[in-house]
Image (cartoon, coloured by chain):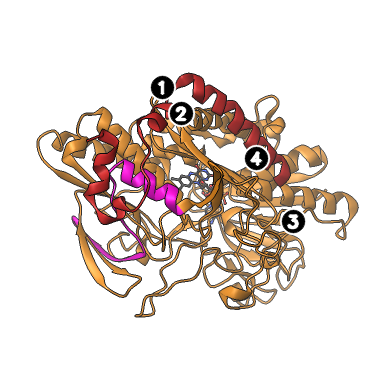
């Protein structure tokens, strides 16, 4: 059994949603990938901030 | 010389007062009346509540900042507004009661030419029996993270639970303490920060961590949820929120109105009318918000609080307050200038203004109990509205009372929000989200009510870095350090 799949069996509501796999989880704290996301998210946020002022 | 009085030195009032003083210079007076001696960057209280920051990290004294800016600071709470003055004078004024500066308990009248109400929320713990102490403060059975002091206390209690969890099972309950709460985002951050710290402390296996909220679906957040583009799909925040809860093994109870809090137990009613109980060893339940209870009087001293304030205590502004069914709600119901309709020199910003209606779909249990989140007014809208109101008043002072007013409708403004899901420079995560506009506009954006090009969300370490940078940036800005005006609200 893959670690990330265990929680599906814990309840009906868990069973009916999506749970990220090992790769998606790894990316969340992967420094290089997150540095890229940091730049992208900042740009997106600045666009929303500038549209709102 | 004109005098602007700002009631409330929180996110919105501090923004309004500091910009107004910068724009008005020494020719005009800006007075801030606020009961707190310290400014608090409230979003970081979450980290105080799990022991990852201290109170000193999230507050700073207001007096030196206002002194440097040339703002007249009164550490006092506003008690009443008299927009028509009194029988022998037409000059409007407010009454205040000092809470500091060596004048505790003394009252005073302060006249004004322009008034901003930025008094934020009253944390209405007593709305739920047992959640409050019966005197308006937090009760003894649960904790809160709404103020820095509450968050310090929450952490002390949490550490006791972590200690016990080394040898025995413990149950943690986090969410909302009433059917009409807002601010689910803060509870969301707190539950996942607890979960993260529990793993770090090696006690996660002995902790049952459960969510309880008044949302009709997970991920509503008082905004009726949001839809974002991910992997070529446009998906509801429900799926994302449920995914995170399932991944972290946090079961949820939603559509819940907490009816009673006792030692180690809450009672609740659900949207389907059923009732139940939930036991806990540690619970953080957000209280419902109300206006702070300001009174208003006319020239003859007659009470006209109902004319100025909505029944929930928030101040009426230029919104359309006509009662109408959900299907007829429009983006244009939301206020644009935040000017009081009866007294044009009076404005309300941040949480202090009365919203025209909910954003989420209204819901009731078969017993008639309303169970739905009330509209959030988070930091970014609170700041933007405060600045727009300050701008309008400065223009009115300089160009006359018919000057064009600045607009900042929540139905035309977006919000960037970063919800922490655990602190750590390399293992922290946060959900970084933007939503545009905050109040959905189904006429402009049929389908989701929002522009999905500017509404997105993703969870990761990058979000945590942003949250951490924002902490330092906003405290720097609030301290009026060099270049503070360049940092957006
Ligand atoms: C735990 C927590 C976490 C949060 N996290 C986020 C987040 O991550 N991002 C985000 O955008 N928002 C967040 N928020 C919401 C954000 O804090 C509010 O949107 C914001 O503080 C609202 O600003 P405000 O000025 O209207 O109210 P406040 O900041 O609450 O300011 C109101 C001020 O008025 C003063 N006051 C009260 N009564 C009186 C009186 N009678 N007379 C004069 N002054 C008075 C108060 O002392 C206070 O200083 C969070 C809220 C909480 C509770």
Q: Sequence order check: which comes first, mark 3 or mark 2?
A: 3
Q: Nearer the viewer, mark 3 or mark 1?
A: 1
Q: Are marks 3 and 1 on the same chain?
A: yes
Q: Mark 4 points at which residue?
A: B489
The colour with which the image depicts chain B is: orange
From the viewer's side, name the closer residue of B14 and B370.
B370
Is the CB–ligand 1 distance for label 4 below 8 Å? no
Q: Name the residue under label 3.
A: B114
Do the residues marked 4 and 1 share a common chain? Answer: yes
Circle 3/circle 1 CB separation < 8 Å: no
| Mark 1 residue's CB less than 8 Å from ligand 1 | no
Q: Which chain carries label 1?
A: B
Q: Are marks 2 and 1 in contact (CB under 8 Å)?
A: yes
Q: Is mark 2 on a helix, strand or loop?
A: helix
Quadrant hosting residue B21: top right
User: Is residue B83 shown in magenta?
Assistant: no
Residue at far bottom of view: B367
Pointer 3 local density, CA inside 10 Å: few below 14, some 14–19, many at least 20: many
Work out how far the residue at label 3 is from the one at label 4, CA to CA, in angstroms.
23 Å
CB within 8 Å, label 2 to label 4: no
Same chain, marks 3 and 4?
yes
Closer to the eye: label 3 or 2: 2
């Amino acid at each position: 059994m893959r670690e990330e799949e265990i929680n599906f069996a814990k309840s009906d509501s868990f069973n009916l949603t999506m749970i990220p796999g090992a790769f998606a989880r790894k990316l969340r704290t992967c420094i290089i990938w997150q540095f890229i996301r940091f730049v992208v998210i900042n740009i997106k946020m600045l666009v929303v901030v500038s549209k709102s002022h | 010389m004109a005098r602007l009085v700002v009631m409330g030195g929180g996110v919105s009032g501090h923004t309004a007062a500091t910009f107004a003083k910068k724009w008005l210079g020494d020719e005009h007076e800006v007075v801030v009346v606020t009961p707190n001696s310290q400014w608090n960057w409230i979003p970081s209280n979450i980290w105080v509540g799990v022991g990852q920051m201290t109170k000193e990290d999230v507050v700073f004294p207001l007096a030196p900042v206002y002194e440097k800016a040339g703002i007249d600071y009164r550490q006092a709470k506003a008690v009443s507004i008299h927009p028509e003055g009194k029988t022998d004078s037409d000059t409007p004024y407010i009454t205040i009661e000092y809470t500091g500066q060596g004048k505790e308990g003394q009252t005073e009248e302060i006249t004004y030419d322009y008034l901003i109400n930025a008094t934020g929320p009253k944390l209405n713990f007593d709305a739920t029996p047992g959640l409050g102490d019966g005197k308006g403060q937090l009760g003894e059975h649960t904790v809160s993270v709404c103020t820095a002091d509450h968050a310090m206390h929450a952490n002390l209690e949490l550490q006791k639970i972590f200690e016990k969890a080394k040898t025995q099972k413990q149950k943690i309950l986090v969410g909302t303490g009433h059917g009409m709460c807002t601010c689910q985002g803060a509870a969301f951050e707190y539950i996942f920060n607890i979960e993260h710290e529990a793993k770090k402390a090696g006690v996660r296996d002995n902790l049952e961590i459960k969510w309880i909220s008044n949302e009709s679906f997970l991920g509503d957040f008082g905004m009726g949820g949001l839809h974002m583009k991910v992997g070529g799909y446009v998906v509801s925040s429900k799926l994302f929120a449920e995914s995170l809860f399932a991944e972290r093994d946090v079961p949820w109870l939603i559509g819940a109105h907490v009816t009673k809090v006792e030692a180690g137990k809450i009672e609740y009613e659900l949207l389907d009318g059923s009732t139940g109980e939930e036991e806990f060893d540690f619970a953080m339940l957000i209280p419902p918000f109300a206006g702070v209870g300001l009174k208003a009087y006319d020239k003859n001293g007659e009470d006209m609080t109902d004319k100025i304030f909505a029944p929930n205590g928030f101040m009426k502004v230029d919104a359309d307050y006509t009662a109408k069914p959900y299907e007829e709600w429009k983006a244009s119901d939301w206020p644009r200038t935040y000017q009081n309709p009866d007294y044009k020199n009076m404005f309300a910003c941040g949480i202090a203004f009365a919203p025209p209606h909910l954003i989420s779909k209204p819901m009731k249990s078969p017993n008639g109990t309303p169970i739905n989140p009330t509209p959030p007014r988070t930091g970014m809208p609170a700041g933007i509205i405060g600045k727009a109101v300050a701008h309008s008043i400065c223009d009115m002072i300089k160009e006359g009372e018919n000057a064009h007013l600045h607009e900042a409708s929540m139905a035309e403004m977006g919000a960037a929000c970063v919800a922490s899901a655990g602190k750590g420079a390399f293992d922290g995560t946060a959900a970084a989200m933007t939503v545009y506009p905050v109040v959905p506009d189904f006429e402009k954006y049929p389908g989701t009510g929002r522009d999905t090009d500017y509404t997105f969300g993703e969870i990761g370490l990058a979000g945590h870095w942003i949250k951490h940078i924002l902490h330092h940036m906003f405290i720097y800005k609030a301290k009026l350090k060099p270049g503070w005006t360049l940092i957006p609200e």
